[in-house]
Image: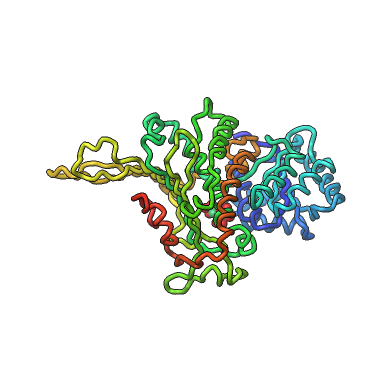
Amino acid sequence: VKENNVLFVIFGGSGDLAHRKLYPALFQLYLKGFLNEHFAVIGTARRPWTHDFFRQGVLENLDEGTNEQQQEFAGHFYYQSHDVKDSDHYVALKKVIDQLDEKYQLNGNRLFYMAMAPALFGTIAQHLKSENLLSNEGYNRLIIEKPFGHDYPSALALNQAIVDTFDRNQVFRIDHYLGKEMVQNIPYLRFGNPFLTSVWNKDYIDNVQITLAESLGVEERAGYYETAGALRDMVQNHIMQIIAMLTFPKPEQYTDDEINQAKSKVFASLPVYSETDVAEKFVRGQYDENADGSQKAYRHEDKIDPKSNVETFVAGEIDLNLPEWQGIPFYVRTGKRLAAKNTCIDIVFKSDVANLFSDQKLENPVLTIEVQPESGVLLTVNGKKIGTSNVVETHQLTDLLDDDQQKQVPDAYERLLLEAILGKQGNFAQWEGMAGSWHFVDAIRDAWAKDSQPDFPNYQSGTMGPKAADALLAKTGRHWIYQG
Ligand code: BG6
């Protein structure tokens, strides 16, 4: 493992994301040697904290390594009180940056992480340039978190504000689902096995199902969630990225550039649905209390509008305009307060190709990619029932990670931060993809907006969502493979 010399400047360094995700992820990179002597982290936020107080907060979120390692690591953290709208504050920040660059010999390598409200991304990016916080030697990179806009126009404006200062290869847009082991595994399955590569198309696949089920409710994020809803929160980004991973045309070479180009073809092929399409192909829902009343209905959650029409569940059918996938529905589903926390992908193969056992029903073979909480691959196939009778039954080939393997899986943030340090763009969202995805999502939102009185709440907490989500598949004789 080679050490990387780098300075992190984290805007929003006092926040929840930084403490829960970023600092522990950096610590993992430290324990593994990707960060060692020559790195520093500056956390900025408005509050007047001391370095010590900041370090204390960092330490509280580390639960591995020895006490000595933790102390060493936290010693590389510095706090700078900062108002992102005040130019003078950037001058002060630059001083600290320059000092640390020299002290730790960082060679001018800088990663600016925007862990705060997107409305400020543009302001920060502009100031970084105008106040000379970008180095002339080494690299300057920007990492951005979602939400990246709330519709196409706002995302476009946000993007413009950023690319005015940073080149596209300097901008790293995090979608943490792209950092999950089994999502990264998809191309390896598709292209590492000729027997799968050859059936990975409309001739052999009947439909594809993607489920991102959560058992938690809205938690403490009412403010954000009331402006977002499940469609923006999960479909526009995570689900779309998974679809792209499942369908991108085979690149000539497995390089970051070629992967991203191939993925952008998928995003460009997303349909823009008419109102009629939306009514037929998309279902929204909002959770009611659970069976015993111990979990509240969404409308009764803290800080939620008691008349809120925000959806906490979406299910829909996405038809890609790609020749390889013509006519193959991609069924997607996500929601809060569902029966279980489970992310899985079911590739449902056709069953009716030359059925030799014509008097018996063959089930659809299914390749299931379990993303979380379990990780691995399951293959459900038809076979013979043991015994003297000639009866067909389904068998499951299972390859799930065991506990030891699971422990080796890096957290999504750890992996993505390392890739940003290494300048690898392959697992980051690109603007073209976001644009296509927003167009798709905007059409659905526009159609929904015309019906301002949805029949909410329409599913009980602890179930797999509204009945209409099952009907969506049932009308063509299909069903959800994952039943909760
Ligand atoms: C986030 C959403 O992007 O993903 C949250 O904003 C959601 O609402 C979360 O809970 C789910 O992530 P994970 O990694 O727990 O599946």
The image quadrant where one finds the C terminus is: bottom left
Q: Is residue 62 above or below residue 107?
A: below
The residue located at (64%, 51%) in the rendering is 151
Quadrant assignment for the N terminus: top right
Q: Is residue 416 left or right of residue 320?
A: right
Q: Which residue is at the far bottom?
A: 293
Q: Position of residue 394 (x, y in %)?
A: 27, 46
Left or right, 314 with reference to 423? left
Q: Position of residue 334 (x, y in %)?
A: 49, 55
Q: Quadrant of residue 37?
A: top right
State whether residue 58 appears in this view: yes
User: What scheme was used to colour the molecule?
Assistant: rainbow
Residue sticking out furthest to the left: 388
Q: Quadrant of ligand 1?
A: bottom right
Q: Residue furthest right?
A: 88
Q: Nearer the viewer, residue 26 or 119?
A: 119
Q: Position of residue 167 (x, y in %)?
A: 72, 35
**In the image, what residue occupies the spot 37% across and 34% down?**
203
User: Is residue 250 depicted above or below 60 in this figure?
Assistant: above
State the image coordinates of residue 279 (x, y, percent, origin top left).
49, 55
Nearest the viewer among 445 and 130 is 445
Residue positioned 55% across, 33% down in the render: 262
Quadrant location of residue 94? top right
Q: Is residue 1 above or below residue 155?
A: above
Residue lying at 12% horizontally and 43% vertically, measured from the top left: 388
Q: Residue furthest top?
A: 252
| Residue 411 visible from this viewpoint | no
Horizontal side, residue 346 vs residue 51: left or right: left
Total label count? Answer: 0
